[in-house]
Every structure is written in structure tokens, then in C-alpha cells.
Image (cartoon, rainbow, N blue to C red):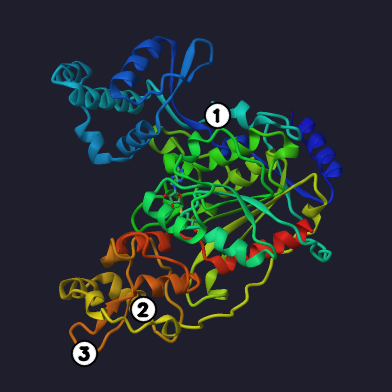
């Protein structure tokens, strides 16, 4: 088999020149969360899944003879993963199945809980297998024109391109998944000569949609979750900043990666690409996520059940899947600090359809600094500054913390330098994630940045409307957004390559 693979690999490399081709083990390519049951437990575990309310009935697959793979709903997967992760929970969950069944008679919520606990106990005992990445949808993303299925995945890497020919003016159509407030669109509009035409912008959060609509109009904007989209409308460019919480490093917590249903939303981008014929897929993709995508390792049920971690990082799995959809791919970390006064390292994935000449013409751009150079340059003189003054109790708990002792600049950055990364939790978890600027004439002499100042740190122009949503939602949406000037540079390079 190894010989066959090597032969295929060399043929592949030859036929796809000039792409560099690498090989990723199949384990690193995620599927959907499932419970795998042996024949003896097939019926009873399905009943338990239904009682727990975790089972979307339509996904029922046969594996290993009479064994079954039962797909869990997103909520079910999240709940089970949390129960298995939670050691304290494990101790508390140790009740016997009959006891739990008795408890279950007390009403449907109790019954659900009892069934959930029983399932978790069976997994812990090794009688059921928790397969958070079972490849139940493999045929959907199969479309393996270039790869032998199930043996592994070839990844076509974008070569460092030649100098692109001058761009011909064209109107670009684009789709924006997980659109937020439209950071991608703001960057694309700045890069494109002619106003780009939206095909679809998909965002589930109403407050973000309100800000998006106030700036770009509601045409093409939908609140339908990406999982429910059947197909992508025809477009030249697909942009997406898929949710990053599960790849973000947080003190004391492991990255949940593909273990977390939010971390699996990327696979719906792949599903949507695979739903169209190759020639109808977008010519190029631009995706963004946190740096942690490079380190997150999908999930390994092994942590709960003794199995082996899958090979490859979540980023590699993403690149392999896009490559399987017919794209040549590349990724790079950019720090918004190259263009803005904010440290913000993010992974950007660029993918260009491998059947297009454009794939040989892409060059990573350098970031350019045109606007503010320091925090001081973004500060306004808010009339309502007092409203933003840091409450005394919060100030005390921040300065008394061990974190502050170790990193005094984290919460009180030098206003003549760049800000630290602005997060969605800026105002919601101020003790952990805020940074303050000086405010004289009171105690403590510090205030929060205003939403406008945070938007400037992200590179949104001053005419970008923010007040279509509550202030708390503005902070969250801006902290979640991609920095438009970085997108502008990347879209410029993509449009140059597309010609
Ligand atoms: C990292 S943010 C992307 C922000 C965006 N790039 C911007 O510039 O504003 C991810 C966004 O995905 C949205 N989201 C999460 N799950 C979603 C889903 N299932 N379908 C559509 N949008 C979703 C979140 O509400 C959030 O706004």
C-alpha cells in the first residue's frame, strides 16, 4: 500500500506541477460527532440518545458489521464533550444505570439528564465509543478527483507566484460566511476597483446583522445558520472568518478544536464547496482564524478513552479539505500591527482553484501602514468620558492580580505604542481582557476605550456606523471582526492573481 501511495503521490506531484504536494494522514480530517455502538448496544444506546434529546434522527449509519454510528446533535456533542472533560463531573456521574432510570421517571428534564449521564458512563467504561470526528459526511466532501479516498489527502500548496499581470477591471461577486459586521467586505471594497457585488452574507447574530445592514444594506444578508445553507450562490470569491473560540488559547484551558461543535463549522464551508461542480465553485477563498488553529489538534477522544491523538493540526486538516475540493492552498500569519496600532496575529488561508492559471500568480502582500500609528492617535475626547471610567473595584482587582504583576502592560498599554489584541470580551470580561487608557481628573485615572476607538484600532473608517446596536454588542462585534486593512491587502493580492 505504501508503494501505491508513493507512486500516486509522485504522479500527483507531476500532474499538478508547479504545486508542491504534501500528504496528510486521514485521521486529521474531521467528520461529525458520533457515538459508535457495538451490535449488543445498538438499540439501547439509540434509545438513550433519543431520551437525552441528543440525536437528530435522520443520521443513522452502519459501521463494522452490525455496529452503529449515531450522529449527535451539536448541543448533544457539546454536552457529552463537556461531561467527559469534566473530572469532577465524572465522579458525580457515577450512579448506576438503574438509579438513573429511577431518577428519569421524575420528569422529562430529569430523564434527559439521566440518559445523558448513562451515555457518558458507558463511554467512560469503554462500552460505547465517542467519535467526535467520525467521517459520516465523507461522501459529501469526497469529490476526490485527485485523491485516493480514505488513504490520505494530498494538499496542493500555492507556489509563491510570479509577478502578476496588470489587473483587468472586473466586478467581483462574493459570499461572506460568518459575516459579523462585514470586516471582510470593508476590506474587499477598499481593494476592488469597482464595487463588489454580494451574493450572500450569512450571520446568525442579530446585533451584528444590524451593524452590517447599516453599513452595507441588507441585500444578500441572511440570518440562516451556515449549517442550513444548501448551496453557495455563484460567486468569484468566498470569504469567511469561521468561529474561533475553540481554537483560542485560554489560560488553564485546553483548546477544544474540532471537539467543539463551533469548531466544526469550518466543515460546512467544505460541504458548501463540495455541493457545486468544480467549475461552479468560487475562484478563490480567503479565510481567517486565530493563530491557535495551527496548534489545535482537532480532537482526540483518546483523552477520555485512551486512544491516539490524530495526526496533523486543525489548520492542516482545513488545508487538506480545501485541497480536496480542488484548490491550491496556502496559509500565513499576519499581525494587524503591520498596518494598525493593534497587535493581532491571525492565520489567513488563501485558496485558489487549482485549475485556474491564477493559482500560479498569487503573492503574499506586505502590509502597509497608512493610518494611526499608536493608541494615542485613535483616542477621541469623549464628552461622556466619565461613563467609561474604570470602576474602582475593578481597577483594584486588576492591579492586585498576579497576572498584572507578571504583565503590567497587558491592561495598561503605553499609549505611544500599539494596543494589545482587542477581544470580543473587552467589556464583558473586563478583569481578564480589557485594556485601559489614561483619564485624568478622577480616581482611578483610567478609562475603557470607546467603541469608536476600538473600531479605529481595527482599521474601520470613521464613517463606519456602529450605533445600530447596543454599546455592549458594538464592543463584542468589533472585537470579533477581521481587520479590514489586512483584508484589503490580501484581497488586493488575490484580485491581482485572478487578473
Ligand atoms: C469570528 S466572527 C467573524 C467576524 C467577521 N469576520 C467580521 O469581520 O465581523 C464569527 C461570526 O460567526 C457568527 N456565527 C457563529 N455561528 C454561526 C453560524 N452557524 N452561522 C452563521 N454565522 C455564525 C458569529 O455570530 C460571529 O459573528
Q: Is mark 3 within 8 Å of ligand 1?
A: no
* Distance Cα–Cα, label 3 vs label 2: 22 Å
Q: Is residue 494 visible?
A: yes
Mark 1 close to ligand 1, CB under 8 Å: no
Q: Say whether mark 2 is within 8 Å of ligand 1.
A: no
Q: x%, y% of residue 116?
A: 28, 26
What's the CA distance linking mark 1 and mark 2? 45 Å
Tell us which disc is closer to us: 1 or 3: 3
Q: Give the SS element for disc 3.
A: loop
The residue labelled by disc 1 is 135
- The answer to whether the residue labelled 1 contacts the one labelled 3, judged by CB atoms less than 8 Å apart, is no
Task: Decide: is 63 above or below 250.
Answer: above
Which of the 4 image quarters holds residue 149?
A: top right
The residue tagged 3 is 441
Q: Which labelled disc corresponds to residue 409?
A: 2
Label drawn at residue 434: none
Closer to the camera in the image, 219 or 331 = 219
Residue 333 seen in the figure: no
Task: Report the mark closest to the observer, 3 or 2.
Answer: 3
Mark 1 vs mark 2: which is more N-terminal?
1
Which element carries disc 1, helix, strand or loop? loop
- Quadrant location, the C terminus: bottom right
Q: Is residue 60 above or below residue 327?
A: above
How many marks can you see? 3
Amino acid at each position: 500500500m505504501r508503494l501505491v501511495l508513493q507512486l500516486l503521490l509522485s504522479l500527483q506531484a507531476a500532474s499538478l506541477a508547479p504545486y508542491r504536494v504534501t500528504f496528510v494522514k486521514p485521521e486529521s480530517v474531521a467528520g461529525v460527532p458520533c457515538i459508535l455502538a457495538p451490535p449488543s448496544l445498538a438499540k439501547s444506546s439509540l434509545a438513550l440518545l433519543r431520551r437525552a434529546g441528543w440525536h437528530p434522527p435522520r443520521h443513522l449509519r452502519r459501521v463494522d458489521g452490525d455496529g452503529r454510528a449515531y450522529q449527535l446533535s451539536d448541543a448533544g456533542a457539546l454536552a457529552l464533550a463537556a461531561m467527559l472533560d469534566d473530572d469532577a463531573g465524572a465522579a458525580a456521574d457515577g450512579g448506576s444505570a438503574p438509579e438513573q432510570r429511577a431518577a428519569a421517571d421524575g420528569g422529562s428534564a430529569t430523564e434527559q439528564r439521566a440518559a445523558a449521564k448513562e451515555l457518558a458512563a458507558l463511554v467512560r467504561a469503554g462500552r460505547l465509543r465517542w467519535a467526535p470526528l467520525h467521517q459520516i459526511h465523507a461522501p459529501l466532501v469526497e469529490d476526490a478527483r485527485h485523491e485516493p479516498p480514505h488513504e490520505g489527502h494530498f494538499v496542493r500548496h500555492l507556489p509563491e507566484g510570479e509577478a502578476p499581470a496588470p489587473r483587468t477591471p472586473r466586478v467581483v461577486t462574493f459570499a461572506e460566511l460568518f459575516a459579523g459586521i462585514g470586516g471582510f467586505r470593508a476590506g474587499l471594497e477598499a481593494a476592488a476597483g469597482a464595487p463588489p457585488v454580494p451574493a450572500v452574507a450569512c450571520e446568525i447574530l442579530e446585533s451584528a446583522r444590524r451593524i452590517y445592514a447599516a453599513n452595507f444594506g441588507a441585500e444578500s444578508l441572511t440570518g440562516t445558520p451556515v449549517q442550513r445553507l444548501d448551496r453557495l450562490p455563484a460567486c468569484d470569491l468566498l470569504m469567511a472568518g469561521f468561529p474561533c473560540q475553540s481554537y483560542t488559547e485560554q489560560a488553564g484551558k485546553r483548546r477544544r478544536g474540532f471537539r467543539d461543535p463551533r469548531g466544526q463549522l469550518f466543515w460546512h464551508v467544505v460541504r458548501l464547496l463540495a455541493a457545486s461542480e468544480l467549475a461552479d465553485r468560487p475562484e478563490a477563498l480567503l479565510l481567517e482564524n486565530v493563530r491557535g488553529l495551527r496548534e489545535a489538534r482537532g480532537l482526540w477522544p483518546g483523552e477520555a478513552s485512551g486512544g491516539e491523538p490524530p495526526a496533523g493540526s486543525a489548520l492542516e486538516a482545513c488545508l487538506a479539505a480545501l485541497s480536496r475540493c480542488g484548490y491550491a492552498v496556502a496559509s500565513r500569519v499576519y499581525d494587524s500591527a503591520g498596518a494598525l496600532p493593534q497587535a493581532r496575529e491571525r492565520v489567513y488561508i488563501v485558496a485558489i482553484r487549482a485549475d485556474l492559471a491564477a493559482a500560479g500568480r498569487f503573492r503574499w502582500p506586505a502590509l502597509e501602514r497608512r493610518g494611526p500609528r499608536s493608541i494615542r492617535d485613535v483616542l477621541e475626547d469623549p464628552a461622556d468620558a466619565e461613563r467609561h471610567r474604570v470602576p474602582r473595584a475593578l481597577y483594584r482587582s486588576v492591579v492586585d492580580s498576579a497576572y498584572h504583576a507578571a504583565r503590567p502592560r497587558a491592561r495598561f498599554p503605553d499609549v505611544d505604542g500599539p494596543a494589545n489584541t482587542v477581544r470580543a470580551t473587552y467589556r464583558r470580561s473586563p478583569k481578564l481582557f480589557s485594556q485601559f487608557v489614561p483619564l485624568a481628573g478622577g480616581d482611578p485615572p483610567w478609562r475603557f476605550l470607546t467603541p469608536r476607538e476600538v473600531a479605529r484600532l481595527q482599521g474601520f473608517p470613521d464613517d463606519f456606523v456602529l450605533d445600530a446596536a447596543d454599546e455592549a454588542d458594538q464592543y463584542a462585534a468589533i472585537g470579533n471582526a477581521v481587520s479590514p486593512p489586512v483584508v484589503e491587502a490580501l484581497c488586493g493580492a488575490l484580485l491581482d492573481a485572478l487578473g
